[in-house]
Amino acid sequence: MTKIVQACAISLLLVATSAVCQTTWSNLQPGLELLNRSFPDHGETVPFVLLRCNPKKYRVRIIDTLHELGKANSFAAFSLNEIQNKMRALIIVNGGSTSSYSIPAPAGLLQVGGKTVSPPNYLTERAGVLCITRGIVSILPLSRSQPRCFDAVQRGPYMSREFLSVPDAPSRRYRRTIAAIDGDGQLLILVTNEKATLSSVAAFLYASNSKLDVRSALNLDGDTSSGLIVATGGDLRTVGNIDRLIASAIAIFKAD
């Protein structure tokens, strides 16, 4: 019963349309939708928020927090909250992890505007890359023959359908932020409001009854860094931690 109440609370926070938990997509704007649901995770029920964006109708960017906001700022200036205060995105979510507790130093590839901010880390197991170029968003395993991206961020593990059968898939529970691409090339962003295993997240994404048609997915920086801001319809709605130091973010803006 507690889990059901929590799931309804998230629905009220993000959709604010009724006191009933939503089980269908809510249209935020044309080509931008939101879904509140939950998935099973080893006897637990994990509520989540799922966004679906058509990248041909919106401008999707990777934000380099250190250089976008300035080196002289305090820790809070590298949070989702401060990024949103400056950039006024429709959607903003945490991206790649930081390798430093004092400055938001990327832990792998970070490319912004066609320029490499941080080189790839090829030593990371099952690493993947979120690549953005010319209105197309893709998620690929990290390789030395990486396609050219306008914006890109490295994280992991990269979760293809084959990830479901990985025998040593991580079983630890953290709050998750996941990016995925469906069969129509739409960007999906899933944020859990409670801790979950990656195996259960992947099982939901690739389940036939989810009707998501996911083709590839990538685990982004999560747990205490997992956060989401939705700023549509004149409202500012949040999930998770929006004040944590992060090295990069994924932002969705109105098309130019």
Image: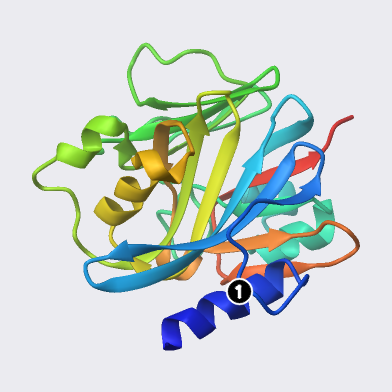
Q: Residue at x 69, y 76 (%)?
A: 12
Where does residue 83 sit, x and y in percent of width and height?
73, 57
Q: Tell me the residue that label 1 is attached to.
A: 10
Query: Residue 254 location in percent, x, y?
Result: 85, 39
Q: Give left or right: position of 112 versus 172.
A: right
Local crowd size for mark 1, using a 10 Å CA cut-off: few (<14), some (14–19), many (≥20): many
Residue 148 to residue 164: above or below: above
Image: 71 above or below 74: above
Q: Indicate the position of residue 168 as horizontal and vertical percent values.
A: 10, 47
Front residue of this view, candidates 20 and 229: 20
Extreme residue in the bottom direction: 2
Name which residue type carries label 1.
Ile
Residue in the picture at 63% in, 51% down: 66
Circle 1 SS class: helix
48 with respect to 174 (left or right): right
Q: Which of 205 and 74 lies nearest the eye of the viewer?
A: 205
Horizontal and vertical percent position of residue 53: 67, 38
Which residue appears at 30% of the width and 47% of the height? 203
Q: Quadrant of the N terminus?
A: bottom left
